Image (cartoon, rainbow, N blue to C red):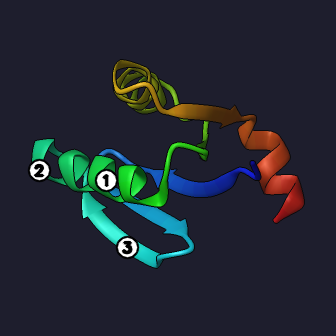
Amino acid sequence: MKSKYIGVDLATEKLDVYGECGHVALRNDEDGRRKFLTLVKKAGPETVVAYESTGYVSKEFAGLLYDHGISQVCINARKVHRFA
């Protein structure tokens, strides 16, 4: 089975989600995270969520994904900026 990827740009106030669904901007609050989880679950069990390490915001996000059994990859911010 081939993996699908969803990229998330994390910020204190919002989540910018990029994937097959296009771009979706969500608030980084309980309601926004619930909508994000719905998007990931609709994408299927082979989905991997990739995000940049951003301190405490990424630690909380990693916990959310872990608690819901979602595969994840935390990418080194320096490598992301070099690639961009």
Q: Residue 24, labelled with which disc?
A: 3
Identity of the residue drawn at 78% across and 51% down: 80
Residue type at mark 2: give it. Asp
Q: Please tell me which residue lies in front, 28 or 4.
A: 4
Mark with earlier residue (2, 1): 2
- Mark 3: few/some/many CA within 10 Å (<14, 14-19, 20+): few
SS state under label 1: helix
- Residue at numbered disc 2: 31
Q: Where is residue 41 in the image (x, y as percent from the top left)?
A: 37, 49
Q: In the rendered structure, which amino acid carries the disc numbered 3? A: Val
Seen in the picture, residue 8 relative to 18 is either above or below; the reply is above
Query: Which residue is disc 1 drawn over?
Result: 36
| Mark toward the start of the polypeptide (3 vs 2) | 3
Residue type of the residue flagged with mark 1 = Phe
Up the image or down, 79 lies above or below 43; here it is above
Q: How many labels does the image show?
A: 3
Q: Is residue 23 above or below residue 66?
A: below
Q: How busy is the neighbourhood of tag 2: few (under 14 within 10 Å), some, or many (20 plus)?
A: few
Q: Residue at x 40, y 31 (%)?
A: 61
Report how far apart the C-alphas of labels 1 and 3 lie in the structure.
9 Å
Image position, residue 39 (x, y; %): 35, 59
Q: Quadrant of the C terminus?
A: bottom right
Separation of residues labelled 3 and 2 (CA atoms): 14 Å
Please report contact status of discs 1 and 3: CB closer than 8 Å, yes or no. no
